[in-house]
Amino acid sequence: MDIIYSALVFLHMIGLAGIIAGFLMQVITDNPKSTKVLLHSSLLQLVVGLLLVGMAEMGDLYDPNHIKIAVKLVISLIIVVVGVLNLRKPAKNLAVTAGVLAILNIGVAVFWG
Ligand code: HEM
């Protein structure tokens, strides 16, 4: 159980890195693949986040803070929507929005007890 939870946290960190990487790729180099990196990473982040909550609840690992989780979920969903719009019609301000929201979610994850 512990190893699966750790693997999910690991993937959650990879997803986070992917969103920031996609955002920076698009803003700095305008690489055509950046929109896919951003969207796929935001989907990974969303799915893995939900699995982390599910595991915490099922395995009685700890009691997740539901308000914090709800805030992270809403921010993540906005990032996915922004990522889809950005894939359809790439725009640097969309990439910046996704990047800033991801950084906001790091703040929520780390500073909200
Ligand atoms: C862009 C989106 C997200 C970012 C940047 C993000 C970032 C992080 C970070 C940095 C951590 C480690 C925090 C720590 O160990 O102190 C973390 C943990 C966690 N995240 Fe996320 N996360 C995102 C989305 C989500 C979503 C959508 C969910 C669930 C709906 C979620 C659920 C969790 C859970 C359960 C943990 C482990 C327990 C905790 O510290 O709260 N995350 N996340």
Image (cartoon, rainbow, N blue to C red):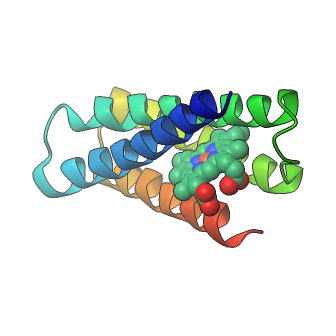
Quadrant into which the N terminus falls: top right
- Residue 48: horizontal and vertical position, in percent? 59, 31
Left or right, 83 with respect to 45, comes to left
Answer above or below: position of 76 versus 81.
below
**From this viewpoint, which residue is outermost toward the bottom?**
111
Q: Position of residue 109 (x, y in %)?
A: 64, 60
Residue that protrudes farthest toward the front in the picture: 2
Locate residue 106 relative to residue 67 in the image: left or right. Answer: left
* In the foreground, 75 or 87: 75
Vertical placement of residue 46 versus 106, above or below: above
Q: Quadrant of the C terminus?
A: bottom right
Q: Observer-nearest residue: 58 or 18?
A: 58
| Left or right of residue 24: residue 108 | right
As rendered, which of 53 and 85 lies closer to the eye? 53
Residue at image point 56% right, 38% down: 6
* Residue at x-position 14% and y-position 46%: 30
Question: Residue 95, how many percent across, how many down?
Answer: 36, 50
Above or below, 94 relative to 28 = above
Q: Give percent across and percent down for residue 79.
A: 53, 43
Q: Work out whether residue 82 can be spotted.
A: no
Give the quadrant of residue 53.
top right
Count numbered badges in the picture: 0
Q: Quick check: 76 left or right of 87?
A: right
Residue 68 visible to the viewer? yes
Residue in the image at 35% along x and 42% along y? 18
Residue ID at (46%, 62%): 100
Looking at the image, residue 112 lies above or below residue 77: below
